[in-house]
Image (cartoon, grey):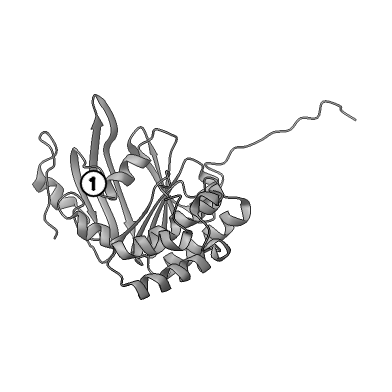
Amino acid sequence: MLPLRQTAPGGRDPLALRESFPADPDEYAIVAQDVTRWFGQVPALRRLSITVPYGRVTGLVGPNGAGKTTLLLILATLLAPDEGVVRVAGFDPVTQPARVRASLGWMPDTLGVYDQLTAREYLCFFARTHRMDRRVASARAAELLATLHLEAFADSPVHVLSRGQKQRLALARALVHRPSILLLDEPASGLDPRARIELRDLLRDLAASGTAVLVSSHILTELEAIADEVVFVAQGQTVDERHVAALGTRHRPTWRVRAIDPA
């Protein structure tokens, strides 16, 4: 059993959390229980709980302002929860951020690309931050440029890339150190239909190789072809969890068409 941490006064009894916490790091890449985060007097997360297994794609769906990005920032070690327990790859993002980051690939909705570098230089730079030597970093950059269909732009400055190409470059950056867990915040935004299909195939391949993928969107149909299961969030809380195959027509709109001209 992993050690538990009470992050703020007024939360649940740590012993009660210990009894119910599903902390098997061999099965779950991400475990969050009763996570709460306030911004001033506004609760962004309210005792939200989620588990993400290895080898599957989990969708995180909810309207804008539901708390999706706040949760991802906590998992990515960039924001601390006020209450609750979080484990990523078995580590605490607050007290063990370096261990979490070594296992985690993170692609936020703001791309953060360096416009004056070439695409190759950009990936090599981030590979080097993960302590790869120059030869290994260069080989990994070339591999990812091919995988994400950016070879033609390898030696072009990033500022000439389209929005969709920058999106793919940001995904390559998240994958540069071969993480076992991948967090993606609205990754399909700005992608054309072909690029969306390529993204789907890449994420399915990563999951098949054992990677845990957590991908957020406010559009359910974006995730239906990608995710194995979907977690619905609203107002900072988990409201439903379903396997994609079981969704059926429950969350799909129904349209009725009436002809004005009876002929």
Q: Residue at x 18, y 39 (%)?
A: 83
- Residue 162 in percent (x, y) is at 56, 49
Under tag 1, what secondary structure? strand
Q: Residue at x 37, y 70 (%)?
A: 137
Q: Residue furthest right?
A: 263
Q: Residue furthest front?
A: 116
Per the image, the residue denoted by label 1 is 33
User: Residue 170: which quarter of the image?
Assistant: bottom left
- Residue 143 in percent (x, y) is at 47, 71
In the image: residue 202, left or right of residue 43: right
- Residue nearest the observer in this picture, 77 or 15: 77
Q: Is residue 228 visible?
A: no
Q: Residue at x 36, y 67 (%)?
A: 178
User: Residue 254: which quarter of the image?
Assistant: top right
The quadrant of the image that shows the N terminus is: bottom left
Q: Is residue 263 visible?
A: yes
- Residue 36 in percent (x, y) is at 23, 37
- Residue 201 in percent (x, y) is at 53, 63
Q: Amino acid at mark 1?
A: Gln
